[in-house]
Each structure stands twice: as structure tokens, then as C-alpha cells.
């Protein structure tokens, strides 16, 4: 009995190619760029995290070595040995650390102004905002704008506390002299995670203190405009990306072929050729299956796995 037509066709199609046409497997080159970029980012993140961790250990040691003093204040005050400047540590249950001997070296009005400055940091929750920005710095350490913003934040928070101290009644002369005395006695650079007295442009600060320049307070209208501007600055790149995104091709009707014929290529013919013909026909010569899939679905070579 004769074999069915379909069986004969399948047997004919699945016959091996002639020995004259060698089979060369398609090997896609591996892209190392994402791995290299991820490794560089991880090294920068680890360096920043290690630096912050060392600062945290130093603060922790200073808190443990501190001795509580009897000064009426909303937060706990401790005197600690070392060269730390006056500063507020911790986000929750903050502690005000004072260098050992500062109570004897500063006049009472100067000491009162310094304490008012530090308590202003506590009310403003500057340590929480500083911690958030330090996390952003560790994540986006490669962006110079992040570091510029960090410097500006330190300057603005010190300026805000200076204005608050002067508004509470401290004289510019006593307050400015108190800051200069702190800088003369404790020359060490302030820690990044501590809200202290120094930490910004000293000459600019002293000039602003002595002239007693007060910044304008924001009204409700100005706050609304500032909020709208910040929202627009964040939303504009997203909207631009959505508007310029390439259109997604709709799932159209899938074209199928009832009959496909596969023949070995001539040994001397190395030309690649694809020719659409009338009637929904397609002729492809010297083309691999992987290339045909890329051509049919409009995808990249690394999206095909055979």
C-alpha cells in the first residue's frame, strides 16, 4: 500500500543536507558591558558605605565615652573626650555631644548661642535628612550633581540655624565669636553624619551673622509655586520619555505558510538573499533559521536562543 503524501513529504524534508555544505553554528558574542558597569558601581557603593560605617563607629565610640552633664535642654547632653566639635548624633532620641573642656573655654553667652544652634538642628530633624541624602550619595556616587546638592544642603541648614539663633535674641557679636572659638579649639573636620556648628563656608557664615541678614519667609503661595516647580522638574523627564518612546507594534494577524520547502544551497553560492513575492510567498537563500526568526519578529540577535 502506498504511503501517505504527508509522510513522504516529511521524509523528504528531513533528509540531511549534502556533505558539501558544512554546517557552521551561530555563536553570538557575549556582551560584558553590563557586568563591568555593575562591578564599577558596586565598588563605588562599597567605598562610600565603608566610609560612612567608619564615621558611625567613631560616633558610637564618642557616645559611649561621653559623660552626661546637668544642663537643662530638650535632649540629653554629654561631654566626650577627643577633638569632636559640638554636634547632634542619632536620628531617634538624639544626643548632643560637647567636646571635653568647652564649657570652661566659652563664655556663657557664647555657649548659650552654640547650644541654641544645636537644638535648632534637632527641631529641624537635620540628621534624618542628612541620612537620606547620604543613602542617595551611596547609590548615585558617580553623579557630580548629587555631591553638589549635598554641599548646598549643609550650607543651607547651617544658615537656617544661624538665622534661628539670631532670631532668638543672641547678639551677632557673641554668636560669631563663639563659632570662631569653636573653630580655633577644635580644628578637626566635622563628620558627615553629625549636625554641628562648623561644616560650611566659615567666612561667608560669619559675614552673614555679623550683618544679621535674614532670609525671606515663604508664604503659602510661594510654597505652592516651589512645590509645583519641583514636581514639574521630576515629571518632565518622564513625560519626555513617554512621548519619545517607540510605538509598540500591535499584535496583528499571524501569517502562516501551508507549505515550506527546504533545499540544500549550492556549494559555491554564498550570497544571502531574501525576496518577498506575490501571493504571500517568501524566498530566502543562504539564511540561517536564527536570522529568519529575527527578520520575522523584528527582534535583536541576543533575543533568540536556539
Image (spheres, grey):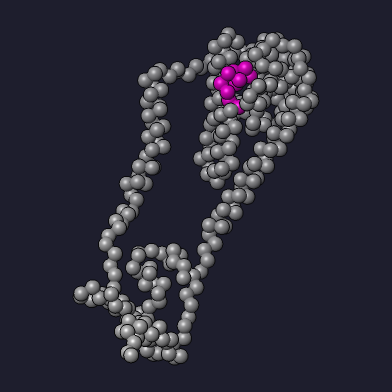
Asked if 296 appears above or below 153 in the picture, the reply is: below
Q: Would you say residue 97 sits in the magenta stretch?
A: no
Measured as percent of width and height from the top left, residue 244 is found at: 33, 49
Q: Which residues are magenta?
A: 118-127
> Residue at 40% of width from left, 17% of height from top?
219
Q: Residue 211 appears at what percent x and percent y?
A: 54, 16
Mark yes or no: residue 204 visible.
no
| Residue 299: percent from left, percent from top | 38, 63
Magenta span has 124? yes
Q: Main secondary structure of the magenta part?
A: helix
Asked whether, in this view, residue 283 is left or right of residue 208, the answer is left
Quick check: 36 above or below 109? Answer: below
Q: Quadrant of residue 80?
A: top right
In-front residue for pair 109/33: 33
- Can you tell which quarter of the image residue 223 is in? top left
Seen from the viewer's position, the closer of residues 28 and 111 is 28
Amino acid at each position: 500500500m502506498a504511503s501517505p503524501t504527508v509522510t513522504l513529504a516529511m521524509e523528504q524534508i528531513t533528509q540531511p543536507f549534502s556533505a558539501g555544505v558544512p554546517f557552521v553554528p551561530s555563536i553570538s558574542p557575549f556582551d560584558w558591558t553590563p557586568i563591568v558597569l555593575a562591578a564599577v558601581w558596586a565598588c563605588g557603593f562599597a567605598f562610600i558605605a565603608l566610609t560612612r560605617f567608619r564615621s558611625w563607629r567613631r560616633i558610637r565610640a564618642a557616645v559611649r565615652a561621653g559623660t552626661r552633664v546637668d544642663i537643662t535642654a530638650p535632649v540629653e547632653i554629654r561631654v566626650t573626650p577627643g577633638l569632636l566639635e559640638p554636634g547632634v548624633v542619632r536620628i531617634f532620641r538624639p544626643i548632643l555631644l560637647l567636646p571635653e573642656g568647652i564649657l570652661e573655654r566659652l563664655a556663657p553667652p557664647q555657649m548659650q548661642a552654640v547650644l541654641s544652634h544645636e537644638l535648632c538642628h534637632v527641631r529641624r530633624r537635620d540628621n534624618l535628612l542628612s541620612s537620606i541624602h547620604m543613602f542617595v550619595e551611596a547609590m548615585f556616587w558617580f553623579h557630580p550633581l548629587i555631591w553638589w546638592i549635598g554641599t548646598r544642603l549643609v550650607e543651607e541648614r547651617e544658615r537656617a540655624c544661624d538665622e534661628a539663633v539670631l532670631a532668638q535674641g543672641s547678639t551677632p557679636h557673641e554668636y560669631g565669636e563663639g563659632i570662631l572659638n569653636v573653630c580655633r579649639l577644635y580644628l578637626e573636620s566635622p563628620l558627615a553624619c553629625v549636625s554641628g556648628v562648623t561644616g560650611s563656608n566659615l567666612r561667608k557664615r560669619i559675614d552673614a551673622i555679623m550683618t544679621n541678614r535674614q532670609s525671606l519667609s515663604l508664604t503659602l503661595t510661594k510654597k505652592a509655586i516651589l512645590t509645583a516647580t519641583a514636581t514639574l522638574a521630576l515629571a518632565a523627564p518622564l513625560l519626555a520619555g513617554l512621548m519619545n518612546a517607540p510605538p509598540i507594534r500591535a499584535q496583528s494577524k499571524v501569517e502562516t505558510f501551508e507549505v515550506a520547502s527546504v533545499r540544500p544551497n549550492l556549494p559555491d553560492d554564498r550570497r544571502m538573499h531574501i525576496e518577498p513575492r506575490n501571493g504571500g510567498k517568501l524566498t530566502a537563500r543562504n539564511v540561517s533559521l536564527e536570522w529568519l526568526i529575527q527578520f520575522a519578529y523584528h527582534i535583536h540577535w541576543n533575543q533568540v536562543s536556539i
